[in-house]
Protein backbone atom coordinates (compact mmCIF):
# COMPACT_ATOMS: atom_id res chain seq x y z
CA UNK A 1 0.00 0.00 0.00
CA UNK A 2 1.51 3.40 -0.92
CA UNK A 3 2.61 5.79 1.78
CA UNK A 4 -0.18 8.35 2.28
CA UNK A 5 2.20 10.93 3.67
CA UNK A 6 4.21 10.83 0.44
CA UNK A 7 1.28 12.34 -1.52
CA UNK A 8 1.75 16.13 -1.77
CA UNK A 9 -1.97 16.75 -2.12
CA UNK A 10 -2.79 14.84 1.06
CA UNK A 11 -0.06 16.74 2.91
CA UNK A 12 -1.48 20.03 1.70
CA UNK A 13 -5.03 19.06 2.66
CA UNK A 14 -3.89 17.98 6.12
CA UNK A 15 -2.15 21.32 6.59
CA UNK A 16 -5.25 23.20 5.43
CA UNK A 17 -7.79 21.14 7.37
CA UNK A 18 -5.88 20.92 10.66
CA UNK A 19 -4.33 24.32 11.45
CA UNK A 20 -5.33 23.97 15.10
CA UNK A 21 -3.30 20.77 15.40
CA UNK A 22 -0.27 22.41 13.86
CA UNK A 23 -0.53 25.47 16.08
CA UNK A 24 -1.08 23.38 19.20
CA UNK A 25 1.97 21.23 18.45
CA UNK A 26 4.09 24.30 17.68
CA UNK A 27 2.96 25.95 20.91
CA UNK A 28 3.82 22.91 23.05
CA UNK A 29 7.19 22.40 21.33
CA UNK A 30 8.04 26.12 21.58
CA UNK A 31 7.16 26.16 25.28
CA UNK A 32 9.30 23.06 25.94
CA UNK A 33 12.21 24.58 24.02
CA UNK A 34 11.80 27.83 25.95
CA UNK A 35 11.98 25.99 29.27
CA UNK A 36 15.04 24.05 28.11
CA UNK A 37 16.71 27.23 26.85
CA UNK A 38 16.11 29.08 30.11
CA UNK A 39 17.35 26.13 32.16
CA UNK A 40 20.44 25.66 29.98
CA UNK A 41 21.23 29.37 29.97
CA UNK A 42 20.91 29.66 33.76
CA UNK A 43 22.97 26.52 34.31
CA UNK A 44 25.73 27.68 31.97
CA UNK A 45 25.84 31.14 33.53
CA UNK A 46 26.04 29.60 37.02
CA UNK A 47 28.86 27.35 35.82
CA UNK A 48 30.83 30.25 34.37
CA UNK A 49 30.27 32.29 37.54
CA UNK A 50 31.53 29.40 39.67
CA UNK A 51 34.66 28.93 37.54
CA UNK A 52 35.29 32.68 37.53
CA UNK A 53 34.92 32.82 41.31
CA UNK A 54 37.37 29.96 41.86
CA UNK A 55 39.76 31.42 39.29
CA UNK A 56 39.87 34.66 41.25
CA UNK A 57 40.34 32.70 44.47
CA UNK A 58 43.23 30.61 43.13
CA UNK A 59 44.82 33.69 41.59
CA UNK A 60 44.69 35.49 44.92
CA UNK A 61 46.05 32.39 46.65
CA UNK A 62 48.98 32.11 44.25
CA UNK A 63 49.66 35.82 44.73
CA UNK A 64 49.66 35.41 48.52
CA UNK A 65 51.89 32.32 48.36
CA UNK A 66 54.28 34.08 45.99
CA UNK A 67 54.50 37.03 48.38
CA UNK A 68 55.08 34.68 51.30
CA UNK A 69 57.72 32.75 49.33
CA UNK A 70 59.37 36.01 48.31
CA UNK A 71 59.50 37.06 51.97
CA UNK A 72 60.94 33.72 53.11
CA UNK A 73 63.63 33.77 50.42
CA UNK A 74 64.51 37.37 51.21
CA UNK A 75 64.97 36.54 54.89
CA UNK A 76 67.30 33.63 54.06
CA UNK A 77 69.09 35.74 51.44
CA UNK A 78 69.57 38.58 53.92
CA UNK A 79 71.01 36.24 56.55
CA UNK A 80 73.27 34.67 53.92
CA UNK A 81 74.43 38.08 52.66
CA UNK A 82 75.36 38.95 56.27
CA UNK A 83 77.39 35.75 56.59
CA UNK A 84 79.21 36.50 53.32
CA UNK A 85 79.97 40.06 54.42
CA UNK A 86 81.24 38.90 57.81
CA UNK A 87 83.42 36.10 56.42
CA UNK A 88 84.92 38.30 53.72
CA UNK A 89 85.47 41.19 56.15
CA UNK A 90 87.08 39.13 58.89
CA UNK A 91 88.98 37.11 56.29
CA UNK A 92 89.03 33.48 55.38
CA UNK A 93 92.18 32.99 57.44
CA UNK A 94 90.29 33.44 60.64
CA UNK A 95 87.81 30.76 59.62
CA UNK A 96 90.51 28.36 58.54
CA UNK A 97 92.71 28.90 61.59
CA UNK A 98 89.90 28.06 63.97
CA UNK A 99 89.36 31.56 65.41
CA UNK A 100 85.71 31.17 64.65
CA UNK A 101 83.80 30.76 67.88
CA UNK A 102 81.96 34.05 67.36
CA UNK A 103 81.03 33.17 63.75
CA UNK A 104 79.96 29.69 64.74
CA UNK A 105 77.72 31.09 67.47
CA UNK A 106 76.33 33.64 65.02
CA UNK A 107 75.40 30.90 62.55
CA UNK A 108 73.69 28.89 65.30
CA UNK A 109 71.77 31.95 66.49
CA UNK A 110 70.56 32.74 62.95
CA UNK A 111 69.28 29.19 62.41
CA UNK A 112 67.53 29.26 65.78
CA UNK A 113 65.89 32.62 65.12
CA UNK A 114 64.90 32.20 61.44
CA UNK A 115 62.18 29.60 61.05
CA UNK A 116 62.90 29.11 57.35
CA UNK A 117 66.52 28.08 57.89
CA UNK A 118 67.58 24.46 58.18
CA UNK A 119 71.27 25.26 58.44
CA UNK A 120 74.10 27.70 57.55
CA UNK A 121 77.44 26.53 56.16
CA UNK A 122 80.72 27.97 54.87
CA UNK A 123 82.84 25.98 52.41
CA UNK A 124 86.34 26.66 51.26
CA UNK A 125 87.54 26.99 47.68
CA UNK A 126 88.25 23.25 47.60
CA UNK A 127 84.78 22.30 48.87
CA UNK A 128 85.85 21.49 52.43
CA UNK A 129 83.56 22.40 55.36
CA UNK A 130 85.00 25.45 57.14
CA UNK A 131 82.09 26.51 59.30
CA UNK A 132 78.58 25.26 60.10
CA UNK A 133 75.66 26.02 62.35
CA UNK A 134 75.85 22.40 63.54
CA UNK A 135 77.56 21.44 66.76
CA UNK A 136 80.22 19.59 64.81
CA UNK A 137 81.79 20.12 61.41
CA UNK A 138 81.40 17.16 59.01
CA UNK A 139 84.54 15.84 57.39
CA UNK A 140 83.25 15.17 53.86
CA UNK A 141 83.72 17.51 50.89
CA UNK A 142 80.91 19.37 49.03
CA UNK A 143 82.77 20.32 45.86
CA UNK A 144 80.52 17.95 43.90
CA UNK A 145 77.32 19.82 44.74
CA UNK A 146 75.63 21.73 41.93
CA UNK A 147 75.54 25.03 43.78
CA UNK A 148 79.29 24.77 44.54
CA UNK A 149 80.14 24.09 40.89
CA UNK A 150 77.96 27.03 39.87
CA UNK A 151 79.77 29.56 42.08
CA UNK A 152 83.19 28.12 41.21
CA UNK A 153 82.54 28.85 37.52
CA UNK A 154 80.36 31.98 37.72
CA UNK A 155 81.70 35.31 39.10
CA UNK A 156 78.11 36.41 39.81
CA UNK A 157 77.81 37.68 43.43
CA UNK A 158 74.02 37.32 43.50
CA UNK A 159 72.08 34.69 45.38
CA UNK A 160 71.79 31.27 43.73
CA UNK A 161 68.93 28.84 44.41
CA UNK A 162 69.93 25.30 43.52
CA UNK A 163 68.03 22.11 42.96
CA UNK A 164 66.68 20.26 46.02
CA UNK A 165 69.24 17.88 47.58
CA UNK A 166 69.36 15.55 50.55
CA UNK A 167 71.47 17.10 53.31
CA UNK A 168 74.69 15.23 54.04
CA UNK A 169 74.67 16.48 57.62
CA UNK A 170 71.07 15.58 58.61
CA UNK A 171 69.70 13.44 55.76
CA UNK A 172 66.76 15.86 55.23
CA UNK A 173 65.59 17.13 51.85
CA UNK A 174 66.64 20.79 51.61
CA UNK A 175 66.58 23.67 49.14
CA UNK A 176 70.10 25.19 48.88
CA UNK A 177 70.39 28.98 48.80
CA UNK A 178 74.00 30.09 48.29
CA UNK A 179 76.33 33.01 47.61
CA UNK A 180 79.90 33.17 46.29
CA UNK A 181 82.81 34.02 48.58
CA UNK A 182 85.73 35.95 47.13
CA UNK A 183 89.24 36.88 48.20
CA UNK A 184 90.29 40.53 48.09
CA UNK A 185 91.67 39.99 44.58
CA UNK A 186 88.25 38.76 43.36
CA UNK A 187 89.23 35.11 43.05
CA UNK A 188 86.95 32.32 44.20
CA UNK A 189 87.25 31.67 47.91
CA UNK A 190 84.37 29.32 48.60
CA UNK A 191 80.62 29.25 49.15
CA UNK A 192 78.27 30.43 51.88
CA UNK A 193 75.22 28.19 51.98
CA UNK A 194 71.85 28.44 53.67
CA UNK A 195 69.44 25.53 53.42
CA UNK A 196 65.66 25.52 53.74
CA UNK A 197 64.06 22.28 54.89
CA UNK A 198 61.49 21.05 52.33
CA UNK A 199 59.19 20.25 55.25
CA UNK A 200 58.95 23.99 55.85
CA UNK A 201 56.86 24.31 52.68
CA UNK A 202 54.67 21.43 53.80
CA UNK A 203 53.72 23.22 57.04
CA UNK A 204 53.19 26.45 55.12
CA UNK A 205 51.01 25.09 52.29
CA UNK A 206 48.86 22.80 54.44
CA UNK A 207 47.25 25.90 55.94
CA UNK A 208 45.65 26.66 52.56
CA UNK A 209 42.45 24.83 51.58
CA UNK A 210 42.56 23.60 47.96
CA UNK A 211 40.19 20.66 48.40
CA UNK A 212 40.91 16.94 48.47
CA UNK A 213 42.19 16.84 44.90
CA UNK A 214 43.75 20.33 44.80
CA UNK A 215 47.50 20.92 44.64
CA UNK A 216 50.08 23.56 45.50
CA UNK A 217 53.58 23.27 44.14
CA UNK A 218 56.83 25.20 44.03
CA UNK A 219 59.26 24.81 41.15
CA UNK A 220 62.49 26.36 39.94
CA UNK A 221 62.65 28.35 36.72
CA UNK A 222 64.02 25.33 34.85
CA UNK A 223 61.02 23.15 35.83
CA UNK A 224 62.63 21.28 38.75
CA UNK A 225 59.94 20.50 41.31
CA UNK A 226 60.85 21.70 44.81
CA UNK A 227 57.66 20.72 46.63
CA UNK A 228 54.17 19.50 45.77
CA UNK A 229 51.21 19.42 48.14
CA UNK A 230 49.92 16.78 48.88
CA UNK A 231 53.50 15.88 49.71
CA UNK A 232 55.23 13.00 47.96
CA UNK A 233 58.96 12.68 48.61
CA UNK A 234 59.55 10.78 45.37
CA UNK A 235 58.44 13.85 43.36
CA UNK A 236 61.05 16.18 44.88
CA UNK A 237 63.58 17.20 42.24
CA UNK A 238 61.60 15.77 39.31
CA UNK A 239 61.49 17.66 36.02
CA UNK A 240 58.01 19.03 35.18
CA UNK A 241 59.14 21.34 32.39
CA UNK A 242 57.05 19.30 29.97
CA UNK A 243 53.92 19.77 32.09
CA UNK A 244 51.00 22.03 31.18
CA UNK A 245 51.65 24.69 33.84
CA UNK A 246 55.28 25.17 32.81
CA UNK A 247 54.24 25.34 29.15
CA UNK A 248 51.67 28.00 30.03
CA UNK A 249 54.39 29.91 31.91
CA UNK A 250 56.56 29.90 28.78
CA UNK A 251 53.68 31.22 26.66
CA UNK A 252 51.97 33.70 29.01
CA UNK A 253 54.80 35.01 31.19
CA UNK A 254 55.05 35.56 34.96
CA UNK A 255 51.38 34.97 35.87
CA UNK A 256 48.45 33.09 34.42
CA UNK A 257 45.38 30.94 35.01
CA UNK A 258 43.80 28.12 32.99
CA UNK A 259 41.99 24.78 33.17
CA UNK A 260 44.66 22.12 32.58
CA UNK A 261 45.11 18.36 32.96
CA UNK A 262 48.01 17.22 35.16
CA UNK A 263 50.67 14.93 33.71
CA UNK A 264 51.29 13.48 37.18
CA UNK A 265 47.82 12.19 38.14
CA UNK A 266 45.77 13.02 34.99
CA UNK A 267 43.29 15.14 36.98
CA UNK A 268 41.86 18.25 35.34
CA UNK A 269 42.29 21.32 37.53
CA UNK A 270 41.96 25.08 37.42
CA UNK A 271 45.56 26.30 37.83
CA UNK A 272 46.84 29.74 38.79
CA UNK A 273 50.59 30.36 38.89
CA UNK A 274 52.87 33.29 39.65
CA UNK A 275 56.61 33.81 39.30
CA UNK A 276 58.37 35.32 42.31
CA UNK A 277 59.44 38.89 41.62
CA UNK A 278 63.07 38.53 42.74
CA UNK A 279 63.90 34.84 42.89
CA UNK A 280 63.86 32.12 40.18
CA UNK A 281 60.84 30.28 41.61
CA UNK A 282 57.30 29.66 40.42
CA UNK A 283 54.40 28.99 42.80
CA UNK A 284 51.17 27.41 41.50
CA UNK A 285 47.85 26.52 43.11
CA UNK A 286 45.05 24.45 41.63
CA UNK A 287 41.63 23.08 42.49
CA UNK A 288 40.06 20.03 40.88
CA UNK A 289 37.50 20.79 38.19
CA UNK A 290 35.20 18.09 39.57
CA UNK A 291 35.36 19.54 43.08
CA UNK A 292 34.82 23.07 41.82
CA UNK A 293 31.71 22.06 39.90
CA UNK A 294 30.35 19.47 42.37
CA UNK A 295 27.86 21.82 44.03
CA UNK A 296 26.99 23.30 40.65
CA UNK A 297 26.24 19.83 39.32
CA UNK A 298 23.96 19.04 42.26
CA UNK A 299 22.07 22.30 41.78
CA UNK A 300 21.88 21.89 38.00
CA UNK A 301 20.65 18.30 38.18
CA UNK A 302 17.97 19.28 40.69
CA UNK A 303 16.77 22.12 38.49
CA UNK A 304 16.97 19.87 35.41
CA UNK A 305 14.80 17.25 37.12
CA UNK A 306 12.18 19.91 37.93
CA UNK A 307 12.32 21.15 34.33
CA UNK A 308 11.94 17.62 32.96
CA UNK A 309 8.88 17.02 35.15
CA UNK A 310 7.36 20.29 33.93
CA UNK A 311 8.05 19.37 30.29
CA UNK A 312 6.58 15.88 30.75
CA UNK A 313 3.40 17.34 32.23
CA UNK A 314 3.24 19.88 29.46
CA UNK A 315 3.68 17.16 26.82
CA UNK A 316 1.01 14.97 28.45
CA UNK A 317 -1.62 17.70 28.53
CA UNK A 318 -0.53 19.07 25.17
CA UNK A 319 -0.75 15.58 23.68
CA UNK A 320 -4.29 15.16 24.94
CA UNK A 321 -5.26 18.49 23.42
CA UNK A 322 -3.75 17.53 20.08
CA UNK A 323 -5.49 14.14 20.12
CA UNK A 324 -8.87 15.78 20.74
CA UNK A 325 -8.35 18.08 17.78
CA UNK A 326 -7.24 15.18 15.60
CA UNK A 327 -10.25 13.05 16.53
CA UNK A 328 -12.54 15.85 15.37
CA UNK A 329 -11.09 15.76 11.87
CA UNK A 330 -10.37 12.04 11.74
CA UNK A 331 -13.25 10.92 9.53
CA UNK A 332 -12.79 13.71 7.03
CA UNK A 333 -9.10 13.03 6.71
CA UNK A 334 -9.64 9.31 6.32
CA UNK A 335 -12.04 9.94 3.48
CA UNK A 336 -9.65 12.29 1.70
CA UNK A 337 -6.79 9.85 2.12
CA UNK A 338 -8.86 6.93 0.87
CA UNK A 339 -9.86 8.86 -2.25
CA UNK A 340 -6.31 9.99 -2.91
CA UNK A 341 -4.99 6.50 -2.31
CA UNK A 342 -7.45 5.06 -4.81
CA UNK A 343 -6.45 7.66 -7.38
CA UNK A 344 -2.81 6.96 -6.77
CA UNK A 345 -3.43 3.24 -7.21
CA UNK A 346 -5.22 3.94 -10.47
CA UNK A 347 -2.34 6.06 -11.71
CA UNK A 348 0.16 3.39 -10.77
CA UNK A 349 -1.91 0.69 -12.45
CA UNK A 350 -2.14 2.85 -15.58
CA UNK A 351 1.63 3.21 -15.60
CA UNK A 352 2.14 -0.52 -15.04
CA UNK A 353 -0.35 -1.32 -17.79
CA UNK A 354 1.38 0.90 -20.37
CA UNK A 355 5.06 0.50 -19.50
CA UNK A 356 7.53 -2.33 -19.58
CA UNK A 357 8.67 -3.28 -16.09
CA UNK A 358 12.27 -4.01 -17.08
CA UNK A 359 13.17 -1.13 -19.37
CA UNK A 360 10.69 1.56 -18.34
CA UNK A 361 9.63 2.31 -21.95
CA UNK A 362 6.17 1.59 -23.39
CA UNK A 363 5.11 -2.06 -23.50
CA UNK A 364 3.50 -3.99 -26.34
CA UNK A 365 -0.02 -3.20 -25.16
CA UNK A 366 0.67 0.53 -25.27
CA UNK A 367 2.35 0.16 -28.67
CA UNK A 368 -0.66 -1.66 -30.17
CA UNK A 369 -3.04 1.02 -28.87
CA UNK A 370 -0.83 3.78 -30.29
CA UNK A 371 -0.51 1.88 -33.60
CA UNK A 372 -4.28 1.79 -34.04
CA UNK A 373 -4.60 5.47 -33.14
CA UNK A 374 -1.78 6.63 -35.40
CA UNK A 375 -2.97 4.48 -38.32
CA UNK A 376 -6.45 6.05 -38.05
CA UNK A 377 -4.91 9.53 -37.83
CA UNK A 378 -2.67 8.88 -40.84
CA UNK A 379 -5.71 7.70 -42.81
CA UNK A 380 -7.63 10.88 -41.98
CA UNK A 381 -4.77 13.32 -42.49
CA UNK A 382 -3.06 11.63 -45.42
CA UNK A 383 0.36 11.73 -43.68
CA UNK A 384 2.90 8.87 -43.75
CA UNK A 385 3.41 6.51 -40.82
CA UNK A 386 6.71 4.65 -40.24
CA UNK A 387 7.74 1.75 -38.03
CA UNK A 388 11.23 0.70 -36.99
CA UNK A 389 11.51 -2.80 -35.59
CA UNK A 390 14.85 -4.04 -34.22
CA UNK A 391 16.30 -6.59 -31.88
CA UNK A 392 19.67 -7.26 -30.21
CA UNK A 393 21.96 -9.45 -32.31
CA UNK A 394 22.66 -12.92 -30.84
CA UNK A 395 21.02 -12.00 -27.56
CA UNK A 396 20.61 -15.67 -26.60
CA UNK A 397 24.39 -16.06 -26.85
CA UNK A 398 24.78 -12.97 -24.66
CA UNK A 399 22.55 -14.50 -21.97
CA UNK A 400 24.33 -17.83 -22.20
CA UNK A 401 27.72 -16.14 -21.87
CA UNK A 402 27.06 -13.42 -19.27
CA UNK A 403 23.93 -14.61 -17.49
CA UNK A 404 20.40 -13.29 -17.31
CA UNK A 405 21.23 -10.54 -14.84
CA UNK A 406 23.69 -9.01 -17.27
CA UNK A 407 21.18 -9.67 -20.04
CA UNK A 408 18.55 -7.59 -18.26
CA UNK A 409 21.10 -4.83 -17.68
CA UNK A 410 21.98 -4.91 -21.37
CA UNK A 411 18.33 -4.51 -22.39
CA UNK A 412 17.91 -1.58 -20.02
CA UNK A 413 20.93 0.21 -21.51
CA UNK A 414 19.76 -0.50 -25.06
CA UNK A 415 16.31 0.87 -24.15
CA UNK A 416 17.87 4.05 -22.73
CA UNK A 417 19.92 4.57 -25.89
CA UNK A 418 16.83 3.83 -27.98
CA UNK A 419 14.69 6.33 -26.10
CA UNK A 420 17.39 9.00 -26.35
CA UNK A 421 17.54 8.60 -30.13
CA UNK A 422 13.92 9.72 -30.64
CA UNK A 423 13.81 13.48 -30.99
CA UNK A 424 10.02 14.18 -31.12
CA UNK A 425 7.46 13.83 -28.32
CA UNK A 426 5.06 12.12 -30.75
CA UNK A 427 7.51 9.27 -31.45
CA UNK A 428 6.90 6.18 -29.37
CA UNK A 429 9.61 3.81 -28.11
CA UNK A 430 8.28 0.42 -26.99
CA UNK A 431 9.50 -3.04 -26.08
CA UNK A 432 7.75 -5.48 -28.39
CA UNK A 433 8.87 -8.62 -26.60
CA UNK A 434 12.11 -10.24 -25.35
CA UNK A 435 15.01 -8.44 -26.99
CA UNK A 436 12.77 -6.95 -29.70
CA UNK A 437 11.87 -3.23 -29.78
CA UNK A 438 9.73 -0.98 -32.01
CA UNK A 439 9.67 2.74 -32.73
CA UNK A 440 6.39 4.19 -34.02
CA UNK A 441 7.08 7.37 -36.00
CA UNK A 442 3.98 9.41 -36.99
CA UNK A 443 4.23 11.84 -39.92
CA UNK A 444 7.64 10.40 -40.88
CA UNK A 445 8.57 9.35 -44.41
CA UNK A 446 10.83 6.44 -45.39
CA UNK A 447 14.03 8.47 -45.51
CA UNK A 448 13.37 9.99 -42.10
CA UNK A 449 12.51 6.58 -40.63
CA UNK A 450 15.69 5.04 -41.96
CA UNK A 451 17.72 7.92 -40.53
CA UNK A 452 16.11 7.33 -37.11
CA UNK A 453 16.90 3.61 -37.34
CA UNK A 454 20.53 4.32 -38.19
CA UNK A 455 20.70 6.73 -35.27
CA UNK A 456 19.41 4.05 -32.93
CA UNK A 457 21.90 1.51 -34.29
CA UNK A 458 24.79 3.95 -33.80
CA UNK A 459 23.65 4.83 -30.27
CA UNK A 460 23.61 1.16 -29.28
CA UNK A 461 27.07 0.58 -30.72
CA UNK A 462 28.33 3.64 -28.84
CA UNK A 463 27.44 1.91 -25.59
CA UNK A 464 30.38 -0.48 -26.24
CA UNK A 465 28.72 -3.28 -24.28
CA UNK A 466 31.06 -6.33 -24.59
CA UNK A 467 29.53 -9.29 -26.49
CA UNK A 468 31.96 -12.12 -27.21
CA UNK A 469 29.32 -14.02 -29.19
CA UNK A 470 28.86 -11.20 -31.70
CA UNK A 471 31.21 -10.53 -34.58
CA UNK A 472 32.14 -6.91 -33.70
CA UNK A 473 32.76 -7.95 -30.07
CA UNK A 474 30.13 -5.55 -28.75
CA UNK A 475 26.34 -5.46 -28.59
CA UNK A 476 24.74 -4.43 -31.90
CA UNK A 477 21.21 -4.40 -33.33
CA UNK A 478 19.55 -5.27 -36.60
CA UNK A 479 16.54 -3.24 -37.78
CA UNK A 480 13.73 -3.35 -40.28
CA UNK A 481 12.06 -0.11 -41.42
CA UNK A 482 8.73 0.18 -43.20
CA UNK A 483 6.59 3.18 -44.08
CA UNK A 484 2.90 3.40 -45.03
CA UNK A 485 1.99 6.21 -47.37
CA UNK A 486 -0.71 8.71 -46.42
CA UNK A 487 -4.37 7.87 -46.92
CA UNK A 488 -3.96 4.14 -46.29
CA UNK A 489 -6.85 2.26 -44.68
CA UNK A 490 -6.77 1.66 -40.89
CA UNK A 491 -6.55 -2.14 -41.28
CA UNK A 492 -3.05 -1.72 -42.73
CA UNK A 493 -1.64 -1.47 -39.18
CA UNK A 494 -1.04 -5.24 -39.14
CA UNK A 495 0.61 -4.98 -42.55
CA UNK A 496 3.00 -2.31 -41.25
CA UNK A 497 4.18 -4.62 -38.45
CA UNK A 498 4.47 -7.64 -40.74
CA UNK A 499 6.53 -5.76 -43.34
CA UNK A 500 8.85 -4.27 -40.71
CA UNK A 501 9.31 -7.75 -39.19
CA UNK A 502 10.15 -9.22 -42.62
CA UNK A 503 12.73 -6.49 -43.19
CA UNK A 504 14.19 -7.12 -39.73
CA UNK A 505 14.58 -10.79 -40.63
CA UNK A 506 16.22 -9.73 -43.90
CA UNK A 507 18.73 -7.54 -41.99
CA UNK A 508 19.62 -10.50 -39.80
CA UNK A 509 20.01 -12.79 -42.79
CA UNK A 510 22.25 -10.21 -44.44
CA UNK A 511 24.80 -10.26 -41.64
CA UNK A 512 23.21 -8.29 -38.80
CA UNK A 513 24.24 -4.88 -37.42
CA UNK A 514 22.41 -3.12 -40.23
CA UNK A 515 19.13 -1.50 -41.25
CA UNK A 516 16.94 -2.87 -44.03
CA UNK A 517 14.01 -1.07 -45.61
CA UNK A 518 13.09 2.54 -45.82
CA UNK A 519 10.88 2.49 -49.01
CA UNK A 520 7.21 3.40 -49.21
CA UNK A 521 4.72 0.58 -49.40
CA UNK A 522 1.14 1.47 -50.38
CA UNK A 523 -1.67 -0.99 -49.69
Image: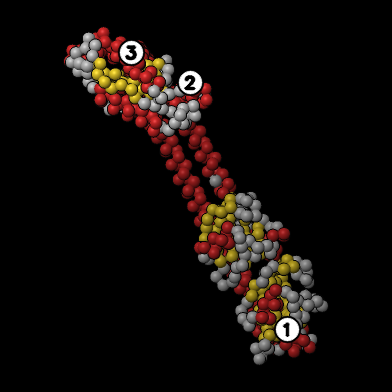
**Residue 301 percent across, percent down from the top left:** 52, 37
Classify residue 509 as left or right of residue 68: left
Instruction: Work out which quarter of the rendered image holds the N terminus and state it.
Output: top left
Residue drawn at the location 43% of the way across and 24% of the way down: 393
Instruction: Say which residue label 1 marks.
Output: 125
Q: Which mark is residue 260?
A: none
Residue 401 image point, x, y percent: 52, 25
Tell me which residue sits at (77%, 79%) in the image. 129
Of all residues, the one furthest to the left in this rendering is 381
Which of disc 2 and disc 3 is earlier in sequence? 2
Q: Residue furthest front?
A: 510
> Mark 3 — residue?
498
Between disc 1 and disc 2, the foreground one is 2
Residue 482: x and y in percent read 29, 18
Q: Which mark is residue 396?
A: 2
Judged from the image, the secondary structure of the residue bearing numbered disc 3 is helix
**Image quadrant where residue 322 sits:** top left
Neighbor class of circle 3 (other Cα within 10 Å; few <14, some 14-19, many 20+) is some
The C terminus is located in which quarter?
Answer: top left
Amino acid sequence: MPDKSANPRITRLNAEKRPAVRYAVLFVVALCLLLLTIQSSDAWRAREDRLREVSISTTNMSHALAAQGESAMRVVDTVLAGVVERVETEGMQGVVSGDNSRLHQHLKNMVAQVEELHGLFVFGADGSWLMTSLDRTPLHNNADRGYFKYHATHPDRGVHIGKPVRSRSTGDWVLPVSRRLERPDGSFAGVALGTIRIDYFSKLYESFDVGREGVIFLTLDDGTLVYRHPHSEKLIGTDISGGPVYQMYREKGPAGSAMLRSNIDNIERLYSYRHLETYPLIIATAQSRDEILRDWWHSTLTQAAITVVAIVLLLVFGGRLVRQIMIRDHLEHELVQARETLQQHNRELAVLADHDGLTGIANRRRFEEALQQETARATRSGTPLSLVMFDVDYFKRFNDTYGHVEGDACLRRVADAFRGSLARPADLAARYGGEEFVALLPDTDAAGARMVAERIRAAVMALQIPHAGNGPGIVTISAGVHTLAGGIPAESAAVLVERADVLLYQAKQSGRNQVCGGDYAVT
